[in-house]
Image: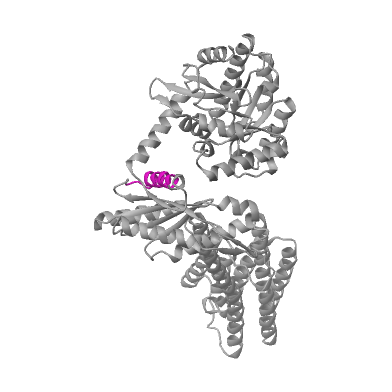
Amino acid sequence: MSAIDSSESTPDHRGDASPFAAKKHYDLIRTRRVAQITVSVIIGLLCVAGIQFYHQAYHEVVILAVVAMLCGVLLLRLRRGRVEQAATAIIVILMTMAGLMAMLGGGLRDAVLYVFPGVIIVSGMLLSLKRTLMVVITIVSYLMLTGLGLELGWWQHETEATGISTALIISIALLVNGFSIYVLHMDLVRLLSKLQAENRRYRETRKRVQHIALHDALTGLPNRRLARERFNALFELSKRKNAKLALLFIDLDEFKIVNDSSGHEAGDRLLQVVGKRLQSCLRDSDTVCRLGGDEFLVIVNDVVDEKALGRLASKLIAAISEPLKIFDMEHSCSASIGITIAPEDGDDFDALLKNADMAMYLAKDEGRNNYQYFDERLQQDANRKVELVSHMRHAIPDNEFSLLYQPKVRLSDNCVIGAEALIRWNSETYGSVSPNELIPLAESSGFIHDLGYWVIEEACKDLRFLKNLGFEQFHLSINVSIAQLQNQNLRTQVAEILDRYGLEPGAIDLELTETLLANDHSQLSSNLDHLRELGMSLSIDDFGTGYSNLGYLKRFDVETLKIDRSFVSDLPENTNNQAIVRAILQICEELGMRSVAEGVEDEATLAYLRNIGCDAAQGYFWSRPLPLDQMIEYLQNASKP
């Protein structure tokens, strides 16, 4: 029962802290204490023996000498690690010696009995509770038996003469006891000090663990868990005060560009700065949290009105948008914010957060770098999307999808050279669902792979049917999404479908968007390379509306550019659009590519495109998108002289 002495070699609590190592160290300290006490006892015995020898009490000298020798033997036992046995033995020897000398000397008045209190204290420090109780019982029994023997006259003791010798013997006994108590007391002091230090470290560690559990490691801001706790506390308070509480869901708009262009360290630094800027805009009663990635959450207490929230949101956006220099490079980043107010928009943290998230996406749809409030329309749109996705998965087996074909016409001779396949969904529950709604839902839900496979197979089956009717030179254009091109099995699937219907790869033209090609994804690039190796041609749809990076035109060996309808609709009157279309045609001429204009609806636009050298076009001037049977009829009529 001794503490670890800091002055003695102690194991580092950060190192080997196993139970075995701790017990080994404890035994080492205990051995030292028993040895120290044993040495002090030997010195005391020899001193008392010298005094008794001077007074010619030779029988006591013999006893003291024998006990000193036995204590010396115990020291040898200690070297062999027999701590428990040695500690027990020295207690027994001292009790026996004291009892024997008291019987030979002054009995219950003998100075040697001063050894007993020290024996009890030392046994309490070094031995188990059970053995200490046995020592106490033994000493008390000895004293009671001695007293009873004297009372009954079994033996008689003369009153011991006292003097300087007695004082010396008592002093030696007390010094030995005092030394033993001192070293054991110091162990207790060190133990208590260590326990206090360990307790302090535990509290500090617990505090750090709690901080880590409730705060974001990068920015030091409260995390989602702490945000939930603070919201719940503030919401209960706001209900009692009949006040309002708001959540502002913040998403950085250009964070990925910074992260990709300058590295993750720059991105981390940007997030840290954004966190500090948000904090600087808030009151002490408000809370800013980092939810993860580039998403932050602000909890606003005691909301006055929506206008005040709007002013705060504008202030936050302005603070975030301020330019920032990171690693000698200037960056800027805007933000989109969605706002929900409790209790109008909900009284549950998760529900409010979900609603704020929907409002934030509305802000992104509205052009980013702005804020939007949540309303029921957003919830209805979200519910509709969930229901559409659920029905979408049954649309293929229920034959609710169909393909329409819009003819492509070669302007030099008005010959129909092909068509663009366009998917339509006529749901029994929701009626006609726009492709602009269908495709994003299919991509976000992962259904785009099944849908894309169905479109390619259905288009190839229809193309085979058209070729069997004699339209051998006819080709089809099929739109593909980025999600499809990230599917590593796409090439194999396309090759199997072409082989199944006996089609040459050149009969299929894949239409891609500029945004899709600008996406830096290794699987996308690999799939495009494999599809080109297979023999399929690539077209850029809606050219001029995206990144307009000419580098990927040669990289992916693009064969056709489709001029977006936004540049074609008022082409004869709009000089800006005329300049853009002429520039696109110049690119096609210089790079040896074909051009196709979309959205041609009148004779004047057709004439203008033909005069400036556009290769082909499509639009309502010739035909709306047609189902297969009407497309066949259209082709048959178009082939008549």
Q: Is residue 530 above or below residue 7?
A: above
| Image quadrant in which the N terminus is located | bottom right
Residue 22: x %, y % from top left = 64, 59
Q: Is residue 420 above or below residue 564?
A: above
Residue 243: x %, y % from top left = 27, 56
In front here: 359 or 536? 536
Which residue is at a point 67% across and 67% down the rendered structure image? 10
Q: Is residue 358 magenta?
A: yes
Q: Is residue 544 visible?
A: no
Which residue is at a point 45% across and 66% down the rendered structure image? 280
State the image quarter where residue 552 is shown.
top right
Which residue is at a point 40% across and 57% down the rendered structure image? 313
The extreme top residue here reads 469
State the image quarter where residue 124 is shown.
bottom right
In front here: 336 or 209? 336
Number of numbered discs: 0
Colour mode of the rendering: one colour
| Image quadrant in which the C terminus is located | top right
**Image position of 226 (left or right of 563):** left
Which region is colored magenta? 347-362
Q: Is residue 163 visible?
A: yes
In front here: 389 or 185? 389
Residue 231: x %, y % from top left = 37, 54
**Image position of 259 (left or right of 339):** right
The extreme bottom residue here reads 164
Q: Is residue 506 above or below residue 607?
A: above
Which residue is at a point 52% across and 83% down the rendered structure image? 159
What secondary structure characterizes most of the magenta part? helix
Q: Is residue 556 magenta?
A: no
Q: Is residue 203 above or below residue 431?
A: below
Residue 284: x %, y % from top left = 39, 66
